[in-house]
Amino acid sequence: MVRQFAGRATQALEAAGGAPVLIDITADVRPDPAALIRQCAGLLILGGADIDPTFYGDSPHPATYGVDPEADRYEIAAVHGALEYGTPVVGICRGMQVINVACGGTLVQDLGADTPHHGPPDAIMVTQQAHIDTDSRLGVILGRTEIAVRTGNHQAVRHVAPDFTVVGRAEDGVIEAIEHASAWMVGVQWHPEDPLADAQDLAAIATALVEQAAAHAAGRDATSVVYLA
């Protein structure tokens, strides 16, 4: 599923005029994250397994799975680099959680068996409603505040990192979107790249990221939008 979603993200970035480059965070050989950020124009962090809870000062919950501390460390370093260099960032699902943890926030490790945020193992993605703040970056990007989103998560943001604001919530109050107060850094908990999601939302988010990346790259030797998966 991750590779399918990465493929749709690639198509959306290309359609928006970007030049996407995929970095496999689980690969044995990867670019140094600091060097990567210096060379790229924008950063997209996609979904995946759970973040090692030690990165936000917690002990593992029995439901926490797929932890890869080296992959977490890599993405966290990339977020720090993006803040330092002013690189625009979008985080999707785990990507939003990485942004939050990297900047000092914490996570709910498990939303419980009865959460409406995912379905059964054979069809984990579900559709639910989310409200987006009108005057947020994301609200402007999407052009509306009430949206149907595709989700499949058992974790969520608990304490929002300093300098970030909650700009989207599900009907049950779970945080669905966050934004940095000054840096162009946006996180969404849902999957706009899911095949059953509204394709216009993915296109709008990709276009906004590519536009910000182009502005960031102006006068610099950086043209690619890098995405981590």
Image (cartoon, helix red, strand yellow):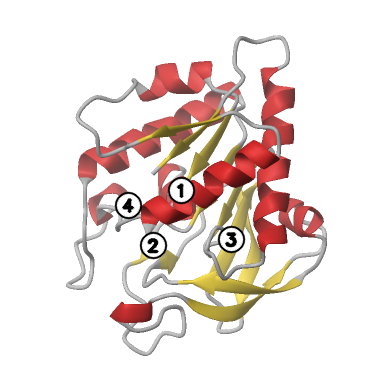
Residue type for callout 3: Pro
| Badge 3 density bin: few <14, some 14–19, many ≥20, Cα 10 Å | many
Q: Is residue 183 above or below residue 189?
A: above
Residue contact between numbered discs 2 and 4, judged by CB atoms under 8 Å: yes
Q: Earlier in the sequence, mark 3 or mark 2?
A: 2
Q: Would you name the residue on which mark 3 appears?
A: 192
Of residue 146 and residue 24, the one placed in the foreground of this image is 24
Element on which disc 3 rests: loop
Residue type for callout 4: Tyr
Q: Residue 221: x percent and y percent?
A: 60, 9
* Marking on residue 18: none
Q: Earlier in the sequence, mark 1 or mark 3?
A: 1
Of residue 37 and residue 26, the one placed in the foreground of this image is 26
Residue at x 60%, y 24% (from the top left corner): 41
Residue at x 22%, y 44% (from the top left corner): 69
Q: Is residue 115 above or below residue 194?
A: below
Q: Between tags 2 and 1, which lies in front?
A: 1
Residue contact between numbered discs 3 and 4, judged by CB atoms under 8 Å: no
Residue at x 46%, y 78% (from the top left corner): 117
| Badge 1 density bin: few <14, some 14–19, many ≥20, Cα 10 Å | many
Residue type for callout 2: Leu
Of residue 126 and residue 86, the one placed in the foreground of this image is 126
Q: In the visual, does 4 lie left or right of 87?
A: left
Q: Between tags 3 and 4, which lies in front?
A: 3
Q: Would you name the residue on which mark 1 appears?
A: 6
Q: Residue 10: x percent and y percent?
A: 54, 42
| Badge 4 density bin: few <14, some 14–19, many ≥20, Cα 10 Å | some
Q: Earlier in the sequence, mark 2 or mark 4?
A: 4
Residue at x 25%, y 52% (from the top left corner): 52
> How much space separates mark 1 and mark 3, taking CA atoms?
11 Å
Q: Would you name the residue on which mark 2 appears?
A: 107
